[in-house]
Amino acid sequence: MSRLFATSLALLLTACVNTAGYQGAGGDSPANVYTIREGESLYAIAWRYGLDYKEVASWNDIGPPYTIYPGQRIRLNPSTSIARAESAPESTSRSSPALFPSPTAPPPSVARTFPAPPEPAVRTVPLPPPVTTPSTQALTAPDGWRWPVQGELIARFMPNGNGSKGIDIAGQAGQPVQAASGGEVVYSGGGLVGYGQLIIIKHDQNILSAYAHNQALLVKEGEQVAAGQTIAELGSTGSMRPMLHFEIRQDGQPVDPLRYLPSL
């Protein structure tokens, strides 16, 4: 009898452990659905996962200026379905009839507020399939590109595998970082793991540039900047030494910045 009880208890504990590890909800695949956190922008999320922000916006019926809000769940894949798409946070009310309603008054309603989806842990959403081949088509970049900072080029563009999706330029802490071309600041913050304090600039509908590892950010989202304008101070946030990590992406895919910048 005691052996039977011990065996049954062991099976019950195993079942409890397996159930506790399950995190799925509503049939949504965590690889394809992302929950927005405070301070994030659509551009930064698309950048993190190597996607074109225009496609992510289209998959989620988000129009310009691509406003998103904390707790919102968005697709990272066009084939993904979300049980309930929302355009803004809201509370939902349901009516529950009283046991003995008054003949002259409607049944009272009971308001129920549904909490926003829980915040995911950092980097818990698996990345979509990485881009392994850079674009070989002719790039149509804006004119007037310039180097974002003066210093030694210490790492070149190597997009395959775990290589660099941009270039690294060594410098001195506090050195001015300048916009490589004019455009709109679409992200300014430290929410992307591995980039430290980061600025992303949209130069046109297809081309964006990123400036990472800054010690100070001098521009905010929504600002228009000119080529050569100081946007940050060089630093070492998210890196081992003072340096600028600089990337350019066309339609969400990394391209070699040296194809844009003046020859060394």
Image (cartoon, helix red, strand yellow):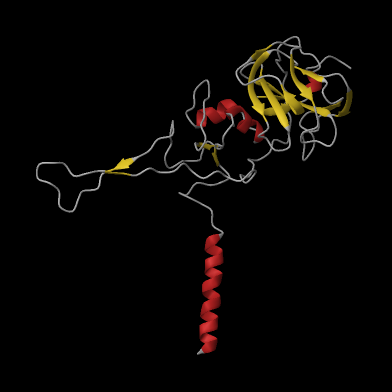
Residue 80, image x, y percentages: 50, 40
- In the picture, measured across the screen, residue 99 lies left or right of residue 241, that is left
230 and 250: which is toward the camera: 230
The relative height of residue 203 versus residue 236 in the rendered view (above or below) is: above
Extreme-bottom residue of the structure: 1
- Place residue 53 in its image quadrant: top right
Q: Where 2 sits versus 95, above or below?
A: below
Vertical comparison of 20 with 64: above or below: below
Query: Where does residue 204 sit, x and y in percent of width and height?
Result: 64, 16
Say left or right for 79 vs 156.
left
Residue depicted at 21% across the width and 44% down the height: 108
- Asked whether the viewer can see residue 136, the reply is no
- Where residue 67 appears, as percent x and y from the top left, is 52, 26
Quick one: 193 or 256, which is closer to the camera?
193
Q: Is residue 103 left or right of residue 235?
A: left
- How many numbered discs? 0
| Quadrant (top left/top right/bottom left/bottom right) for the C terminus | top right
The reply to whether residue 24 is visible in this rendering is: yes
**Quarter where residue 48 is shown:** top right
At a point 59% along the width and 31% down the height, the residue shown is 39
> Which residue is depicted at the point 55% across and 43% down?
119
Say which residue appears at 44% left-offset and 43% top-offset: 115
x and y percentages locating residue 44 in the rendered image: 63, 30
